[in-house]
Amino acid sequence: MERLANSQLVHRLVFLLLMLSMRSSAIANVAVQDFDTHIEDAETVLTGMVREGRQGQVILVVETSLKGAGKPNEEIVIDENSRLAWRHVPGGGPMPPTSYADFVQQIQQSDWYQKRVVLVGSIKNGKWISYCYDWSVWTSGLSTRKEALKGLSFEELVKAIKSKLGESTATHQVKTASQGTRAEKPAIAPNPQPPVVQPTESKKTFAPRPVTPPPSDEPASSTPWSMIVVLTVAALGLLWLLLKRRS
């Protein structure tokens, strides 16, 4: 009986160790995204605190936005679909909570609940979606699983993230500028076209018409009246002389 009990105990210990190794392997397979990939690929990087809201729901109270959306003191809902506080089943990967009560319990038992944290993910319809489950919640450099950052405090981690984001922004601007330069082509000047001369209407000169005086009511005479008078006087004088000689 004693040997049987010892054998069963050994089998249980072996089974427990096997389950723990499978769980660690599953967790390692899920957390494939490193610190740099988190920062570069995520839409939003926030600092804040996860706590209970006024209406009893779990919320993220934003402190600062390091990347993307998010305003100071903004409250973002965290629920069972936010990919936080999920269980990691050996061989099956992360599993969502079975109920909202189970989700709240897992959140409250996490080591980052009601602490200043860096959260990496996105905001969809007013709710937080974690980038890579609980591995996207950092309380210090140790949480990032990056060897060079393990000794950083929360404040130092935030500075490192800002520096990383600045480098990414500068690199993106350089790439954008170089792509824009390659895309630009020298503008080809159009062939100069001769000016089109619009035909102008020829100016017509009109010669002034001779103005004819209106016809006079008096008949025109070929001899002036003064000559008629002179001739009449002369004829009368000659006639008078002839009559005088005869007498």
Image (tube, rainbow, N blue to C red):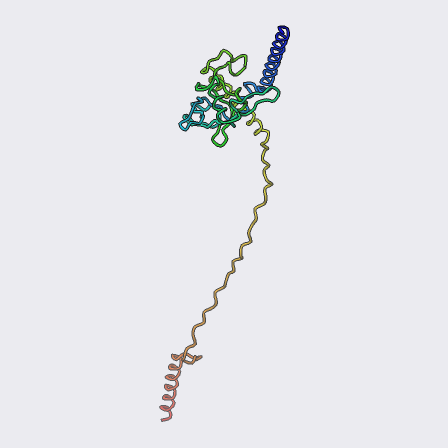
Q: Identify the image quadrant of residue 19.
A: top right
Q: Is 234 or 78 nearer to us in this picture? A: 78
Q: Is residue 114 visible?
A: yes
Q: In the orientation shown, which residue stands out farthest toward the front?
A: 1
Q: In the orientation shown, which residue stands out farthest toward the top?
A: 2
Instruction: Locate residue 153, reporting x and y percent.
Output: 46, 13
Instruction: Locate residue 241, reporting x and y percent.
Output: 37, 88
Relative to 96, say whether 19 is above or below.
above
Q: Is residue 173 visible?
A: no
- The quarter of the rendered structure image containing the N terminus is top right
Instruction: Locate residue 244, reporting x and y percent.
Output: 35, 90
Relative to 211, say whether 1 is above or below.
above
Q: Identify the image quadrant of residue 222.
A: bottom left
Q: Is 85 or 12 nearer to us in this picture? A: 12
Q: Is 134 or 120 nearer to us in this picture? A: 134
Q: Residue drawn 51% across and 12% down?
A: 150
Q: Residue drawn 43% across and 76% down?
A: 215
- The quarter of the rendered structure image containing the C terminus is bottom left
Q: Is 154 or 60 nearer to us in this picture? A: 60
Q: How many marks?
A: 0
